[in-house]
Image: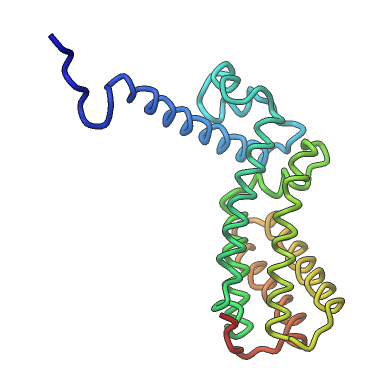
Amino acid sequence: MANPAPAAGGHPADRPPRRRQARGERRAQQLLDAADAVFARSGYAATSTNAIAREAGVSPGTLYQFFPNKAALAVELGRRYNRALQEKHSAAFTPANVALPLAAMLDAAVDPVIDFCTANPGFAVLLQSTDAPDLVAEEREPVHAAAVAAVEDMLTHRAPELSPAEVSLSATMSLGIFKGGLELYMTADAAERKAYRKEIKRALFGYLAPIVGTAAVPRGD
């Protein structure tokens, strides 16, 4: 007698591996979340895989099933940060946002990145650590380049009279102002952060207003 045809969706034996894969992905993300928290609290150099495992509520052996060492965790966490930041930059510098009045444009560009860093406190720690794997910094470079290009495009659209050299200088200065303010924000306590967020945007407004103006501009799309 012939075997019955498998149910819709494939043979039942196909399904457990997919469930295991989903569970494994959730566990990997759980470990990365734990690494983010411990890196933020202790710094990269002082963090151990045992501390990350404790934070995640798993055994060190379970951690090693997914990541062979602390460096591998840092690199994968850096990749996760970079993917998220690329999405933030893309959403921030849309043609519609670039055309907004300057204050509204800064809200649209600055707030998502600050919110991301607030939600991922290990980001700044890992990025600034001299002990972190070189690959963390190397993989950050394309994201930084994309941020520079986005700011340069904004400047070119809002101030087309600028020369390429002026655009490059102004983009570099704008990002420098933002990074300096963000460092102060990340080291401030919760009660001070609202004020620092406001000051970051005020500093950028003061720098950019003479260059790109404060009014809305025609959209570029």
Residue 150 in the image: above or below residue 87: below
Residue 178 in the image: above or below residue 95: above
Answer with left or right where residue 162 lies relative to residue 157. right
What x and y, as percent, mark residue 203? 74, 76
Residue 60 in the image: above or below residue 118: above
Where on the picture, by quarter, is residue 167? bottom right
Query: Looking at the image, which residue sits at the far right?
Result: 165
Quadrant of the image containing the N terminus: top left
Q: Residue at the location (64% across, 68% down)?
A: 197
Q: Residue at the location (60% across, 44% down)?
A: 80
Query: Looking at the image, which residue sits at the far front?
Result: 1
- Count of residue discs: 0
What x and y, as percent, mark residue 56? 53, 29
Quadrant of the image containing the C terminus: bottom right
What x and y, as percent, mark residue 73? 65, 32
Where on the picture, by quarter, is residue 98? bottom right
Q: Residue at the location (62% across, 40% down)?
A: 36
Q: Residue at the location (81% across, 84% down)?
A: 162
What x and y, as percent, mark residue 126? 72, 43
Nearest the camera: 37 or 132? 132
